Image (cartoon, helix red, strand yellow):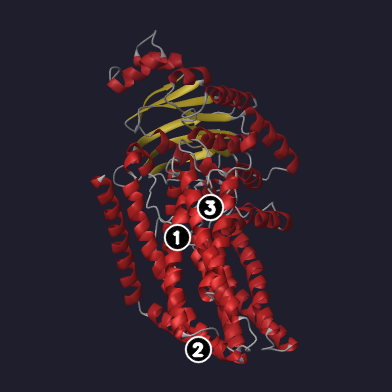
Amino acid sequence: MKQNKSLLQQRIHTTWTKATRIIALIASGGGTPLVLGILLVGFYIAYQSLLTGLPATFPFDWVVWGILTYTLSSVEFRPWIEKADLVFLLPLEHKMPAWRKTAFLYSAGMAMLRLTIVLFLLYPLYRIRIGTSLEWWTAISMLLALQVWTLWVRMMGDHRRLQEFSHILDQACLWGITSFLVFWSLHPYQIYTVLALFLPIAHSIWLYKTTKTSQMPWMIWQKRESIIRHRWQSLASWFVELRGVEPPIKKRTWLIAIIHRSTTQKEPFTYLYWRTLIRRSDLFASFYRIWIWAALFVVSLPYTWVSWTITPFAVSLFVLQMPRLITQQTYPLWVKLYPVSARRAVHSWASITRILTALLGLLLVIMPLAMKRVSYIEAIILLLINWAIGFVIIDWNKRKLSHSNPPD
Amino acid sequence: MLSIQNITGGYSRTSPVIHNLSFQVNPGETVGLIGLNGAGKSTTMKHILGLLNAHSGSITIDGSTLSDQPEDFRSKIGYIPEVPLFYPELTLWEHLELTASAYGLSDEVFHKRAEQLLKQFQMGRARNWFPDTFSKGMQQKIMILCTFLTECKYLIVDEPFVGLDPIAIDELAMLLQQRKEKGAGILISTHILDMAEKLCDRYVCIHQGNIALAGTIQEMRSQAKLPHATLHELFISVVRGDHR
């Protein structure tokens, strides 16, 4: 087992060495630290405005409860299992508990770090509106212990994931018990104490009994590891260019069904690019991240000029990224063999980008309108500005793409 | 006619892999491209498909080159690669729909052919699955289904039988035969010489990037001066250099 354990430690060490290099590369880059700095200052100002601006009747404790329940329940066990391990480590399955223990300790450390950051961010909200410092520190110690328990439940639950009903039941138990315990940690009333301790213990015993003879979920853990890796790589690729990263495929059946009914099936590249965008590309995530990010700024900062600057900026940010759908996405060589010109590929790209830009422009205007930052007339003008900026950038990119090499 | 004239080429300009190759594939015939691993078969096919640029020589389909009429040239060629190449984000059915749309098939023709092919290759239950969950043989079937969905005049088929189950091998051989009877020209590369003997009318035997033997089995026997040799024996004699 010593060899297995050192393999895991080596893997963790290599990953962190690479991550440190990427962080150093980002930090040494000219613009990124500056943009991040501005964003942090912006976030701080927005948070301050939120604390003072919201009415006293706003249900702060429910917001804190919801955020903490999500943070604790959505924790992930990182197994560090790679594809090749399904061949080379499989014969050593009987020696894998030590691997699992180390991976668990690592995951617990990371989960507690994440929880600490969330608690640090929630602290001003808690202190001003909910409780005292002493109560807060009491809650923290209970929540950290709870985080280790939820991680253990997640890890053990992986052994039962092949049975669909068991998995749903595990999820329900985890979220239910966690939400109850978080509520109790924030409001430690005597009456709940016995129940609060009884529930996780009973659930743990039941989970242990039902999984103690089950095999290691190799395939689930290998898939999880690749998703976790991709998530970090995807985050890093916002700042530096990373090659050879294969994203996981997301089915998104309902969204594909909408696209299938509402767009033409006759243009092959339109057909392909929609599916690539929705199921495989980071650009889809960019779309809603940019929207949420801009909406948060509009909600948090009660100034009209914020809406007038943030929304066109958000549209530009999205449109400028869209050429990646052609230039950075890897397609098999079929795209070169189809009897379809590269001009039609660029045309398909432009039509998809126009639709998304129109939608994003509209979604971005709804928030300032709902928050009464702008009037109806101003909202229409803002919408037209968003669309105009987006469409100008699209045309500029279209010309650039048409003059470059055909897509590959 | 698919005509390859004096093609020299490869992956770098300084060291060509194939040297001065010339042969034709006529409509309604199957030509077998045979040779050892690394002989230059796949490189030749990549040149025909326009994935590699030849150092010298020309490739024409019915008189026109890829640079003259790219869309017309491409619409006449169907390709089954040796290694399955698929879009991980598309299901099997979506691969078929995309191919139909790229080659401009009508909905009616598409549905009729797609359903028939799915049934023929026993892939109906997998129509809405993503190909990364398929076995290698099933992934290869995607390539076959997409190619036979179109009515291309010429088929370039690279090691098509590798990884297929016996029923799929029979079905593929039958489809290739049917396409030939309908007038398609087929260039097929394979190591399975028994299958090549069954399917091919003529052969081009490549060794170290040069054509060592070419023609019908009779013509190759006289070129190799082995009047009673089988295809297998001719192939062995070429790679051992006996006939030179």
Give the amino acid type for the residue marked by disc 3 in the picture: Ile
Number of other residues with Cα within 10 Å of mark 2, as a class: few under 14, some 14 to 19, many 20 or more: some
Label 2 sits on a secondary structure element that is: helix
The mark lying in front, picked from 1 and 3, is: 1
Does label 1 lie on the same chain as label 2?
yes
Let me know if residue A111 appears in the view: yes
* Residue at which label 1 appears: A149
Q: Residue at x 61, y 37 (%)?
A: B126
Number of other residues with Cα within 10 Å of mark 1, as a class: few under 14, some 14 to 19, many 20 or more: many
Residue B53: image x %, image y %?
Answer: 42, 46
Give the amino acid type for the residue marked by disc 1 in the picture: Trp
* Residue at which label 2 appears: A45
Q: Earlier in the sequence, mark 3 or mark 2?
A: 2
Label 1 sits on a secondary structure element that is: helix
Number of other residues with Cα within 10 Å of mark 3, as a class: few under 14, some 14 to 19, many 20 or more: some
Let me know if residue A237 appears in the view: no
Q: Earlier in the sequence, mark 1 or mark 3?
A: 1
Give the amino acid type for the residue marked by disc 2 in the picture: Ile
- Disc 2: which chain? A
- A215 relative to A106 in the view: left or right: right
Q: Earlier in the sequence, mark 2 or mark 1?
A: 2
Residue B150: image x %, image y %?
Answer: 63, 38
Give the camera-side residue of A128 and A222.
A128
- Disc 3: which chain? A
* Residue at which label 3 appears: A249
Give the camera-side residue of B25 and A321.
A321
Residue A140: image x %, image y %?
Answer: 44, 74
Q: Residue at x 25, y 51 (%)?
A: A6
Residue B89: image x %, image y %?
Answer: 56, 50
Check the picture and name the quadrant holding the C terminus of chain B. Answer: top left
